[in-house]
Image (cartoon, grey):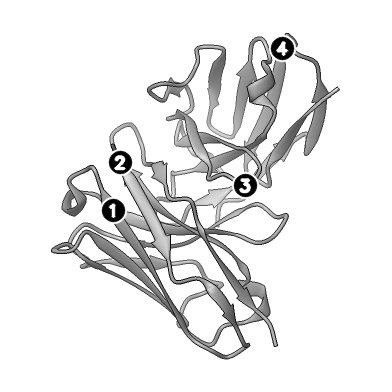
Amino acid sequence: DIQMTQSPSSLSASVGDRVTITCRASHSISSYLNWYQQKPGEAPKLLIYAASSLQSGVPSRFSGSGSGTDFTLTISSLQHEDFATYYCQQSYSARAWTFGQGTKVEIK
Amino acid sequence: EVQLVESGGGLVQPGASLRLSCAASGFTFNIYAMSWVRQAPGKGLEWVSTITTSGGSTYYADSVKGRFTISRDNSKNMVYLQMSSLRAEDTAVYYCAKENFGSGRNFDYWGQGTLVTVSS
């Protein structure tokens, strides 16, 4: 199985801050990397697919980058509604999906 | 509008069985693979199972292989997860998810989830 490791596990930030979350794969996954946002009590929501493609309807302050084993999710200017937990997911081994452990973004 | 609505969760004893259902609408159901993803209380996301468009191929996480069975009924736009020999560690919210394809695969729509609690 491909293991996905996110860092940090949690972070505190203020509205307007630039936030970066990192995801590392145990093996090269090319650009087969997705990012999801989950708010308490809600289902996950797809933000970024194929490492850097923005899902329809997602604000442009979200962006993704990386390939191979190292990936980044960036929120350029954190908004109130962005406080949530973020998960990366590899789709290289499709139908054997694995997620990172999550990064909780909290208000400073 | 795409909608996925799960049902069938509840409280069961260890060793029992339970069947979850997911009703899909708002898209051409029979051309998309469907999956179940679960989330234990306070924990992260874990992929459970996927079924291809016709139901001809199914995939399972090692943690549920041999105990869970995924199926679908394209005439009813339904996907199911039959769970047997349930264990305490199967306690989770179970989400139904639609698989998108194109530039890689992803889960572009999710249901609201149904809670399964395994406890004596």
| Left or right, B98 with reference to A107 | left
Look at label 2 and name its amino acid.
Val
Task: State the CA–CA distance, disc 4 to disc 3.
Answer: 25 Å
Mark 4 on the same chain as mark 2: no
Task: State the CA–CA distance, disc 2 to disc 1.
Answer: 7 Å
**Circle 1 SS class:** strand
- Residue B116, image x and y in percent? 57, 71
Task: State the CA–CA distance, disc 1 to disc 3.
Answer: 21 Å
The residue under the point 81% across, 29% down is A11
Task: State the CA–CA distance, disc 4 to disc 1.
Answer: 37 Å
Mark nearest the camera among 4 and 2 is 2
Look at label 4 and name its amino acid.
Arg
Q: Which residue is nearer to you in this view: B71 or A63?
A: B71
Say which residue label 3 marks. A41
Return the residue found at the far left: B75
How many neighbours does mark 1 have within 10 angstroms: few (below 14), some (14-19), or many (20 or more)? many
Question: Residue B1 got which mark?
Answer: none
Say which residue label 4 marks. A18
Does the CB distance between marks 2 and 1 fall below 8 Å? yes
Say which residue label 1 marks. B24
Task: State the CA–CA distance, disc 3 to disc 2.
Answer: 20 Å
> In this picture, is B113 found above or below B65?
above
Quadrant of the rendered structure where residue A81 is? Answer: top right
The residue under the point 75% across, 13% down is A15
Quadrant of the rendered structure where residue A25 is? Answer: top right
Look at label 3 and name its amino acid.
Gly
